[in-house]
Amino acid sequence: MTKEEGAAAIEAILFTMGDSVTVAALCNALDQDLKDVRAQIKYLKEKYEKADSGIGLIELEDSIQLCTKSEMYEYLIKVAKTPKKITLTDALMETLSIIAYKQPITRLDVERIRGVNSDHAVNRLVEFNLVQELGRLDAPGRPLLFGTTEQFLRSFGVKSLEELPSLDAVRVEEFKQEAEQEINVKLDI
Amino acid sequence: MTKEEGAAAIEAILFTMGDSVTVAALCNALDQDLKDVRAQIKYLKEKYEKADSGIGLIELEDSIQLCTKSEMYEYLIKVAKTPKKITLTDALMETLSIIAYKQPITRLDVERIRGVNSDHAVNRLVEFNLVQELGRLDAPGRPLLFGTTEQFLRSFGVKSLEELPSLDAVRVEEFKQEAEQEINVKLDI
Amino acid sequence: MALEVKLQVFEGPLDLLLHLIDKNKIDIYDIPIAMITEQYMEYIRAMKKDDMEVTSEFLVMAATLVDIKCKMLLPKEVNEEGEEEDPRAELVEKLLEYKMYKFMADELRERQMNADTHMYRKKNIPDEVMSYEEPIDYDTLLGDANLAKLNEIFQALLRRQEDKVDPIRSKFGKIEKESVDLDQKTLYVKAYIREHKSFSFKQLLEKQGSKVEIIVTFLVILEAMKVGDIQIEQDETFGDITITSNVAAE
């Protein structure tokens, strides 16, 4: 068996086994002595060092194993990870709007307004870096307070929170209704 | 990206994925056009043809996959658990050959050719991943259509369906016999 | 009985027919229907009665054979082109097609024997690749979301919340739970400290009724210690606590 042939056999074994294989097992499979197998492994290692190889060889104690070269990870990501098209769901938009207008606000208060548990939504918004922890409320349990991030301002194209469209429209409407009721009451008397 | 770098990236992807990868997916991962990727695959194939390689490349329709070279089998069976070879009964082989040559084909058409109900045989072949559903026939009852899988190509050592032993050979043989008999008949008179 | 075992090797009626044709060394294109039908029926009779599914398929073929046999006895039919029709033609065609696939099955089996000397690899994606999270594309993430929409959603939420308020129940009065007033208790304890200068915790508790009151009193003591108004000592675990005031007498 030539050094090349030995290297090829070792390569085939490592390829199939996936896991690490002891040098002793290789000697046995190839029916070669340790010295020869070591030389074949060295040959293989040098072959993998060339630019045209995407595979590498790692040595662990008395075993060796094939692995993908880390320089190749960027290509692997493109194949193994299908790009996710994430968009904000209605639940996330709702949660975000509450946090934007009522910040700093606790998870519990968000839940109170939405009427459903919103932990997941808040966590997702934190993951997306649209919402962040602002500190803790000085109350029993010291709950976390949440508010919007700079990324939120950038994404929505505003310089500061003051630029958020005001809620006055609603407020005004409410006041008007209240006022009308008061007048009615007075007229009743 | 040089041809060597491209080949290395393809090698890494195939090595990692284990299963076959479409050439289109490789183009996408490497951000290269089809012509370049084809050249890189050719480079890789040539690299594997050398004596110092235990790995080979098989082409299946529009996909490629890494596998060990046949010559390495003798070493591999000493270390690796050889995959259980599926032994197909006559009924299954018959059904498989009908599906292979007549695909896409419905269960009913298989039954018509074999003269016996073949539902069980078709189901078994689907279980063995040699046959798969291809869709439905646009006919009353919208029956399922079946065809062979990539695993079928691998198991039977063909690159594509075109490489299946041609049916004509048998036909030719039959016609030959028929002709000979006719001559005999005529001579007899 | 021996026949039954033998019968099971036939995959179907066509398989059995081919076997008979082969056994009798007959030309497939010129089947002596009468003879084959007889032999075929012999097999059928020997068949297991319980396997109805298979038996029925064999019976259908038997009927077809008998049908062909009858047609052979009658004057030959002539088709549109004026040619004589062989009643066996359809069966022959079926047999040939079946025979072809049977042959291909053997071919494929041979290929399978030779093919599987390759070995493959299991998918093995490095952890670094698996754990990779792509950066967030904010344009896609937000889609058509903008400030106006955010505002709209929030206002809709507020309105929904108002709707939820029960107009009758919301006007019911509340029954407050009895509680210990922390401020009152603080004043009380502070006054006690000023009065007594040095005393034990047990002594202080003498005038406290409920568990809640005791807890609140203890909290007030802790607070007073924290701000440095008092010093406390305890000789042993669970022992009484001695409290000494640091506040100078007025």
Image (cartoon, coloured by chain):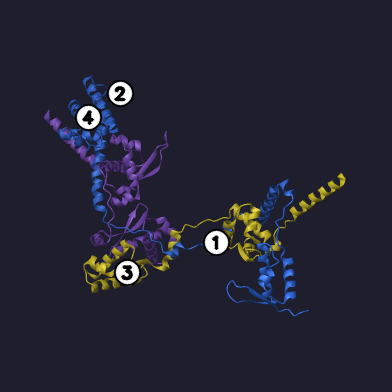
Chain colours: A yellow, B purple, C blue
| Residue C7 at x, y percent in the picture | 21, 35
Residue C80: which disc? Answer: 2
Of mark 1 and mark 2, the one earlier in the sequence is 2
Task: State whether residue A85 appears in this view.
Answer: yes
Q: Give the residue drawn at x 55%, y 60%.
A: C137
Q: Amino acid at mark 2?
A: Glu
Q: Is label 4 or label 1 in front?
A: 4
Q: What element does badge 3 sit on?
A: strand
Q: Residue furthest left?
A: B188
Marks 2 and 4, how far apart in space?
Answer: 37 Å
Q: Give the residue drawn at x 24%, y 24%.
A: C66
Does the residue at mark 3 contact the one at mark 2 (Cβ under 8 Å)? Answer: no
For label 4, the residue is C44
Marks 3 and 4, how far apart in space?
Answer: 64 Å
Q: Quadrant of the C terminus of chain B?
A: top left
- Residue C61 quadrant: top left
Q: 10 Å neighbourhood of mark 4: few (<14), some, or many (≥20)? A: some
For label 1, the residue is C136
| Residue A46 at x, y percent in the picture | 32, 72
Q: Chain of mark 2?
A: C
